[in-house]
Image (cartoon, rainbow, N blue to C red):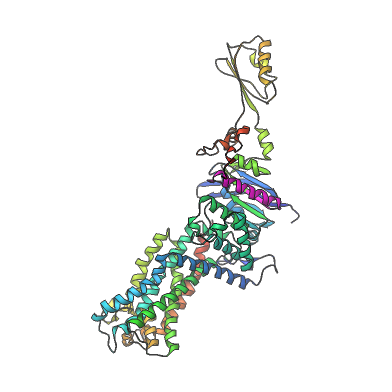
Amino acid sequence: MPNDMMIEAEGLAKHYGQTRALAGVDFSVPGGSILGLLGPNGAGKTTAVRILTTLALPDAGRARVAGADVVGHPADVRRHIGVAAQDATLDGLLTGRQNLVLVGELSDMRRTASRQRATELLAQFELTDAADRMLKGYSGGMRRRLDLAAALMTRPPVLFLDEPTTGLDPVSRQRVWEAVRELTAEGVTVLLTTQYLDEADALADRIVVIGHGRVIANGTPQELKEASRGARLEVTLTAPYPGAAEAIGSLAAGPVHLSEDGRRLSAGVDSALGLATSVVRALDAAGVLVDNVEIRQPSLDDVFFSLTGGHLAAEDDDPGNGAAGPEGARPEMEGAGA
Amino acid sequence: MTTTTLRQGPAGSGIPGQHPAAVAGRLRDVWGMTRRNLVHISREPMQLSDVTLQPVLFTVLFIYILGGGIPIPHGSYKDFALAGLLALNLVTSTMGTAVGLSTDLHGGIIDRFRALPMWQAAVLVGRSFADLMTSCICALIVAVTGLAVGWRPDAGAGLVIGGFALVLFFAYSLSWIAACVGLNSKSPESAASFGFIVLFPLAFVSNAMVPTQHMPGWLQAVADWNPVSAVTAGARQLWGNPNPSGAIHAWPMQHPAEAALIWSALILAIAAPLASYFFRRRTTE
């Protein structure tokens, strides 16, 4: 195919009974890059992955992975992909090593090559000590790492990771991130679904936000952040004043809203140095007394909320995931290896 | 059409030359799945006891407890009973196929297999081969236990082995019916209940443990045409053991080995394609 897109989805739609899981989704992933598919639970992320990995048939639309049509040539697709799904898809009664060797053999690898690759991956994911124990006894983090190792057995050019770090502790999470970064350095194309904005931010070259089965936003992490970076200005006046809105109109990024009692003004603003001072000066020049000025930066959760109408993950109490400030950047990593 | 999805293994490859002969690839897939299922059986003591402990228990219980009360013309109960015990054990152990497949389909593991470039039907074929191998172990244990309690075949080695093969072939074909059940059951538990509802009557309404001559007329007719009766009588005939059914005029009882082969082949010819169809239906979403 004269096309450098390794994953292409066009108008993908899928119903499960009465539920519409996908309502026409388009995106594409250039070779060697990471796409973060971001959305809350039930947004349609997993359905999109299931279609792209040949596990589900789309009701409408088409998709190609590594140049092969997922409906017309599923066997060709399967030969080029590695999948680490959300549910445990490895065999609890086999050892870690047996699981990997089985995946290799079922993917047409020779037995010796399969064993060699398994040993290599077990070492890479620090599972050598547990290699010959039954998977049943693995911790959640170990299972996820083995899942990822299984997806990498055949060195596939395209990798699908469905919420690879959900439920992982910060250390395991960081390890998975590192592994994914190393892969793209080798030219592997990755589609990663996640509920965590910081994960998409840290790993993805492009982010597609989906909600209710549709693409809500599509861009680089930088673009998405800038598109919703606008802060919120809220001013409380001592008394209602007719010319107040006009006085700060030039500072606002959009229309200025006036509250019913005429005392509160609010507007979207672009962050700028000395904005509060400029606001107060402008109102002072217009002869208005100001009680309070507040400029609120939206958190990443706010950004997500404004796009999807739903919160990221209600159960998520890790402050590192939602906070926009520099302090939100995983301080838990310190000493975590001790 | 029915098998297109299942054949999207190496055979469906659009990249000729990169993969060895499709048949070899399929055999490797089947062997991989067979080994996986054998590991399972070795790790699940309950599953293993079906083919190790149960045959010993059944053999000893039936021969010592029932044996004294059932007169067998021209022979002893233990010589009569062993073919029946073999059939009973192998028929009831096919429940494992239904439960195993159902368990696979309810876990996430089936998604893993479906996203691999393997011959998808290997999931079914590998399961049936693993179950055939455990059936062979079961048959061996029945034979050893039988010999220990005094069972003696009265035929050449070839015929004795032929008798075992006859019963094993039947159990293998029956495991494909069990596969159909497993592929259609809502849970592994409901697949297990298949054993009690279908397999036990199938095994017991037959000449396996008692001669059918003493059954009420209608039940005797059912028993005489029950494939389990043909299989059991066939094994008795090949082993030179007492076979009271030989006096019954129903065709399968006059030609038990032939009837057993016809039954087994017929069941296999219907149930195996049906299982592939159910598998495809179950794994399409």
Q: Residue furthest right?
A: A2
Quadrant of the drawing holding the N terminus of chain A = bottom right
Residue B257 in sight here:
yes
Where is residue A121, by image quadrant? bottom right
Residue A217 rendering spot, x and y as whole percentages: 64, 39
Residue B1, horizontal then vertical, whole percent:
57, 66
Q: Quadrant of the C terminus of chain A?
A: top right
Percent position of residue B135, x then y: 44, 74
| On screen, residue A173 above or below A77 | above
Magenta span has A333?
no
Is there any visible trace of residue A22 in the rendered image?
no
Front position in the image: A50 or A156: A156
Is residue A175 highlighted in magenta? Answer: yes
Front residue (pair B281, A34): A34
Q: Residue B9: x, y in percent?
A: 61, 66
Above or below residue A3? Residue B161 is below
B237 vs B40, left or right, is left
* Range of magenta residues: A164-191
In the image: residue B176, left or right of residue B87: right
Determine whether B155 is above or below A175 in the image: below
